[in-house]
Amino acid sequence: MTKRIETYAAGLYALALAEESVDRVSDELHRFSVLLERSETLRDSLGNSALPADRRQAAVEDLLGGRASRITVQMVSMLVGLGRVKDLPAIVTALLAQVAAERQRAVAEVRSAVPLDEDQLTRLTAALGSMLGQAVDLRVIVDPSVLGGIVARVGDVVIDGTVRHKLELLKEAM
């Protein structure tokens, strides 16, 4: 992680903390980051330096205005204006890690083909917390490419409980 990414994340954290909106901002930025990751069209549009910065920033206002906090909209708009929208996922990852560290928790990114209900989220949080020996904040991403089961990532540790992974293991064993 570069110093620039850490600086953006630290500044964003300080601003969200001062506005008492850390949870909301981190959740909104995480959701937008996932949307950005999934949509090549959105990435290309917001990152297109051939378009004037004010047009790209207006697109951010259209996308997020009224749906996200002022801090979230301003952060995304600033990155778009500076031509740094590609850094957003790394900034969000750094922000989530900082929030979790301040709360003495781990961040687990969980990918599932379908939304998880409250009971599943509770059991998954407890299981990951038990395995890691510390409380866990889940960030769930619904990812249709996951074929049954889930993939959980906590830092560098990946726990792959998908059907695809189990079939690959079975294939190797045969």
Image: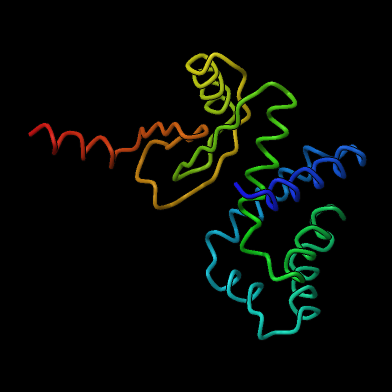
* Quadrant position of the C terminus in the picture: top left
In the displayed structure image, the side of residue 36 where residue 61 appears, left or right:
right
Closest to the observer: 101 or 37?
Answer: 101
Vertical arrangement, residue 144 with respect to residue 140, above or below: below
Residue at the image point whose x is 70% and y is 45% from the top: 6
Q: Nearer the viewer, residue 170 or 93?
A: 93
Residue, x 64% and y 58% (percent of image)? 87
Compared with 130, 1 (above or below) is: below
Quarter of the figure with residue 50:
bottom right
Residue 124, position in %: x, y?
Answer: 51, 24
Left-right relation of 145 to 6: left
Q: Nearer the viewer, residue 23 or 146?
A: 23
* Image quadrant in which you'd find residue 164: top left
Q: Is residue 152 left or right of residue 60?
A: left
Labels in figure, total: 0
In the depicted view, which residue is nearer to us: 28 or 133? 133
From this view, report whether residue 111 is shown above or below residue 48: above
Residue name at image x 78 percent, y 73 percent? 57
Q: Is residue 16 left or right of residue 63?
A: right
Residue 110, how many percent across, how many down?
A: 51, 37
Q: Which residue is the extreme one toward the right?
A: 18
Residue at image x 71%, y 35%? 98
Residue 171 placed where, x, y %?
Answer: 13, 38
Above or below, 24 relative to 59? above
Colouring chosen for the image of the structure: rainbow
Q: In the displayed image of the protein, which residue is found farthest to the left?
A: 174
User: x, y (%) of residue 27?
Assistant: 71, 43
